[in-house]
Amino acid sequence: KAVRQAAAQRLSEILATDIKNSWRYKEAVIMGLGHISGHDNVNTPPLNGEDLLSRILLPEINLTEDDKVGTWILKGRVLWCASQYADEVPPTLLPPFLQASCLLLQASIQPSTPSSTTTLPLNSIALISVKALSGFIPRLSPTILAPFLPTLITCLNAMLRSSSGEGLILILDTLLLTCKVDKSLTAVHVPTLAPYFLHHWMNNPGDPQLIECVKDLLRVLASTPQGMVALSPPLQPTLLAVFTSPALEPMVEAALDILWLVGSVVFADGLEGAAQAREAQKEMVTSLFPQLAKLLMKTDDLSLQKAGANCMSVLLRYTSCIQPAQLECAVNIASKLMVDDLLDTAAIDASPLITQLVTLWSSHLAPLLPSLLQTVLHRLSIAKLPSLIQALLIIIARLVNHSSDLKPVLDFLASQRTPNGQDGLTYVLTYWTKYHEKFQGDLNVKVSLLALGKLFQTPDPRFENIQVPGELITDPNNNNKRNTTTTTTDQWTTVPFKLKVTYIFLKDYEKALTKPAPHADEEEEDEDYLGEGSDESQGDTIDLDQLLEDDDIHGLMDDDEFADPTDSIDPLHPVPLTSIIEGWMR
């Protein structure tokens, strides 16, 4: 407090006197005030931020064309100092400082009188203005910021052309803040913005901070249909060059992340015109998928394989852009991540890719089905990580749900032998019925139940002879005490498969009925989905077979903006669990 009070007092004295080169004294004091902001209790300081901005700094921000170099620099310092106190003052006090920052930035980028400003260090003054803006923008409402946004975007974009190093990161961060304010306005500027920051990314492939800035900007630019339409033309050749040029190999992993990002964002909840945005990406996906497949098939880099599998899982959703013959590549890439010598944490990265294959391309998988099932079954036999076990079992469940003819699937599983001597079908059903109650996520439970119900109703005589774990046998004398001298394995009763399925459905139904009631808005969504006049309590159910066959599922979105797009557009996502169970019971 004492330091701030002394600095403010010294600044007041300098303002009241005519000292030669006084701007240097002012600059030193203002810089000190800026650096000590926030270091005391703002509720009872000798000089609070509001008093500093309104009484001392505000009179110093007027800019005229006749100002000399020192005055321009000083005004930039004043604006930066004010931005350091932006969190301490009412937002209504900040617009004059925002306006002055924009004017100083505009004057230093586009000087109206070159003869009077050629001696000024324009780039330094512009960066000082950008530092000030980065403090003001988060504190002001979109309504206040709206008149300044076109100028800000234009000036920041102009600075991108010749910036580098820390200055470039500062500009990109401030540009990101600006673009988030009005995404519709930002979309108009995408054709001029994207080429410059993509150029910087190409020229700085080893800068992780720059890569993160670029990805954050791409997420914003791609979040509107207009932005996606404008972004695809400059982004497509950039990514294509990275995927095909050996000299750009260090950039491949970042390029995969970017492609995954822009491919995923168009499936996010709340994106109006998502279909238009996906349409804009079709040409890019058609062009990049074959090159991506070639790249992933020849690389042994595990990080690239994992990033590539995640990326390919999104691109497979563009079904009209990919030839069925290219699916073999996707299966081979998934198999690479499932080999024995890779950890479960690596293998689990293949599950989204396989999920898309069996969900969207099941009708084209017949030639690849043996290889795919063998990969999943083998990895299941050695998996230890619970999340991987769940992912593999859910893949099989989805394959059951999306197969029009289950016989090839069941025949192949029954023909395989597992390490414990069981046939593959018995082994899968044993694992599945044992682990179903441990599945995490409502969607996974729904997928599992629907598939188990379909198997229950399949007239295959093999199901009559398959025994699976029933209930866990507990030792009443154990008293839940850990035995430190011997190790034992859990003991289970054995029951027929169809009996265990019945038990699973009844147990899950009981859980669903005893869960807390949803909020009113959630109930309204369920009623809207079930149809006008439908009433679950009266026994009406939905046609789940028709639901799985419905191709127009892209409008069903999750409430979470960052949810897995695979989950958010799944046709089962909005379906009440009780509807699935009641449909099976009938």
Image (spheres, rainbow, N blue to C red):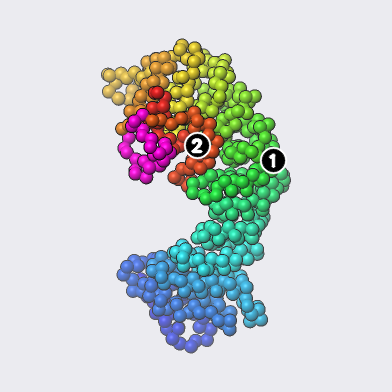
In which quarter of the view is residue 452 placed? top left
In the picture shown, does residue 325 fall above or below 218?
above
Residue 518 painted magenta: yes
From the viewer's side, name the closer residue of 136 and 385: 136
Mark 2 or mark 1, whichever is nearer to me:
2
Marks 2 and 1, how far apart at CA = 28 Å
Which region of the structure is painted magenta? Answer: 515-539
In the picture shown, does residue 562 fall above or below 60?
above
Does dot 2 land on a helix, a strand or a loop? loop
Q: Where is residue 414? Give x, y as percent.
A: 54, 16
Q: Where is residue 549? Give x, y as percent.
A: 53, 31
| 2 or 1: tag closer to the N-terminus | 1
Q: Amino acid at mark 2?
A: Asp
Disc 1: which residue: 291
In which quarter of the view is residue 338 placed? top right
In the picture shown, does residue 122 fall above or below 372?
below
Q: Amino acid at mark 1?
A: Gln
> Residue 149: which numbered mark, if any?
none
Disc 2: which residue: 570
Does dot 1 land on a helix, a strand or a loop? helix
From the viewer's side, name the closer residue of 434 and 515: 515
Query: Can you say which quadrant of the picture contains the N terminus?
Result: bottom left
Query: Can you say which quadrant of the picture contains the C terminus?
Result: top left
Q: Where is residue 360? Give x, y as percent.
A: 57, 33
Residue at 34%, 30% in the rendered image = 538
Q: Residues within 10 Å of mark 2 (few under 14, many from 20)?
A: many
Q: Is residue 542 visible?
A: yes
Residue at 49%, 49% in the rendered image = 270
Label 2 with label 1: CB-CB less than 8 Å: no
